[in-house]
Amino acid sequence: MKFPPKPWGTSGNPLEHLKSLGKALKESSSPEGEGQAKQTGNWNPQLHFVWGMIVDQYVAGARSGDEDVADEFEKFWKVAVDENLFSASASRERKFWGFLLFQKMLTDASDYKELLVSVFSPNLVRCLINHMSQEDRFLHRAAEKSLRTVQQMVEAHPHTIPTVLSKLIGGNGFYNFDQVTKTKTIDKMLGWASGKDAEAVVEILLKPALKIEGCESDKDAETRRQCFGDYLLSMIRRVNVTDESVDATWVKTTGLPTFGRLAYSKKHLKCKPELSEASRTMFRGRLTSAFAHLISDPKGFSYPIELLQSVKTDAVEMDDEVEAAKEKALATMEKLLKKTKKATESEKISLEALALLYALVIFQLLNGESDAASVLDELKLCYDKLIRGKEDEEGQDVSQVLVEILLSLMSRSSLLLRKVAQHVFTAFACEITAEGLALMTDVLSASESAKGQQALFDQNDDEEHDHDDEDGSDSDELDSDVEMISANGDADDAAGDGEDADMAALDKALAAALDTHRLDEDAAAESDSESDADMSDSEMLQLDEKLVEIFAARKKAPNKKQEAKDARANVVNLKNR
């Protein structure tokens, strides 16, 4: 066999002839279809050693400080690997080789760190996702092993997370990569990020969520932004506030401020499409969940306070009265923080706890909570008497006011508010009087019914109250234990009576609309009724609209049985807390 005298040109360097080198490495210089059976039969599942030799040349160049080696390797990888082994027309055997080479690069990441950015090439990422998304694909196991190798690499070398993440969720990747591939690759990566790497990760995740190119609908944008909210919350929840060996400064500098801007700010926030109110509400919920995690330990009290001091709330529309209440509360919170600088250790705990309570009630005010303004007024009374020592002309027991505030927080479903209430009670336990403690013990004797809920939570719904007085059965029957109710069935009977009354009212409304009567009312029907002539189109439309109104009203009507059940659950939950 006669070979060309200079197959690699005058220089003899194969790296200067990438297309020819790629064909040689692929072991095929003919069209893909020719001799396919023969090639497959002679195929070797092991990666040829020459791949390692070629890659080592680039590694040596990177170690020697060659500034051009990264660009040269990118060209090599694109031609010899991405457009060769992972092309759409490449056989699955060649793609398997590609996955083996990909795994080799990731396994030796410490040697190839300057070159890794080129390894996650478009065709490779596309092929990886395609074979991971379906378990019956031929290369599913190879793709699965490749992703495990990715996870092992980023865990061992966290500085590579920003590089890898940008390739998997951008370009040919998917923002919801884990959902598409049915893995937890991104979720695990986010948990390993810390310090400056975490700050870079947040920026990488945020950019595609703010400006969504080619967005088909607002719903798609909201889905993308909800995914970002889940990503960031997942990162924050991995932070251990008590572990001083971990650099968690990114939470204050980047994590929480990002949530704060998306939830409350409008200026300097360029979004396409614009942030919807639904997305802002979602981000406020994620921020609340983040706070709930961070203040699990008293050391995390400063997270909500510092965010409140820095975030711009121009996206929240407030009237002058509410705005004034917010500014007044912020000023009081600042005074509390100022006092902590000269306070003793025990005094500092109380000051920080009250400042934290102020901060979270202000966030409630920003979130549109209806009773937040009145709670701020009560907190001001607590501040004046407990901190400033100011005497109240009415001689009101301030500990009772504080306990009532804490009980109102404990009664809600928010984990954050319950944790804050516990911190504040611990800080001011020595200030609570017997009357204040009595308010807490009175909860245990409250009736587990709608009336008990009304007494505890000070509900004043006139319609509901009137209905309870007229009916008198629902709440009275629920005063006993659940076992007794189940045994005698009185609660079910009471609810059934209410449902019968509702059905009778519905029958009456339908009869009036249709100008009919029940079969058992034939004797009372007028014998000289109007003829049964067909209705006109306009009359049919009017009838249709009337029926829609009747059934809509029926649907909106409160379910008394469910209301009684919910009331009991609320009272029991409050007792348990």
Image (tube, rainbow, N blue to C red):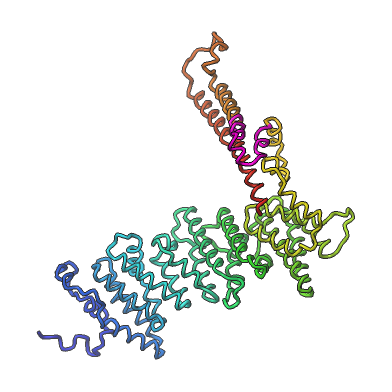
Relative to 550, is 87 on the left or the right? left
Residue 249 image position (x, y, % from top left): 60, 74
Residue 111 image position (x, y, % from top left): 39, 84
Q: Which of 491 and 315 is in front in this view?
A: 491
What stretch of residues is rendered in magenta? 472-497
Residue 7 image position (x, y, % from top left): 19, 85
How many marks can you see?
A: 0
Residue shown at 40%/76% (left/top)?
A: 117
Majority secondary structure of magenta residues: helix
Determine whether 335 is above or below 214 in the image: below
Determine whether 316 is above or below 81 in the image: above
Q: Quadrant of residue 105?
A: bottom left
Viewer can see residue 312: yes
Q: Which of 58 and 402 is in front in this view?
A: 402
Q: Quadrant of residue 145?
A: bottom left
Relative to 158, is 83 on the left or the right? left
Determine whether 29 is above or below 470 in the image: below
Viewer can see residue 320: no
Residue 509 image position (x, y, % from top left): 58, 25
Determine whether 513 is above or below 296 in the image: above
Q: Quadrant of residue 353?
A: bottom right
Q: Nearer the viewer, residue 63 or 545?
A: 63
Residue shown at 18%/69% (left/top)?
A: 40
Q: Quadrant of the N terminus?
A: bottom left
The stretch drawn in magenta includes residue 69: no
Q: In which quarter of the image is the C terminus?
A: bottom right
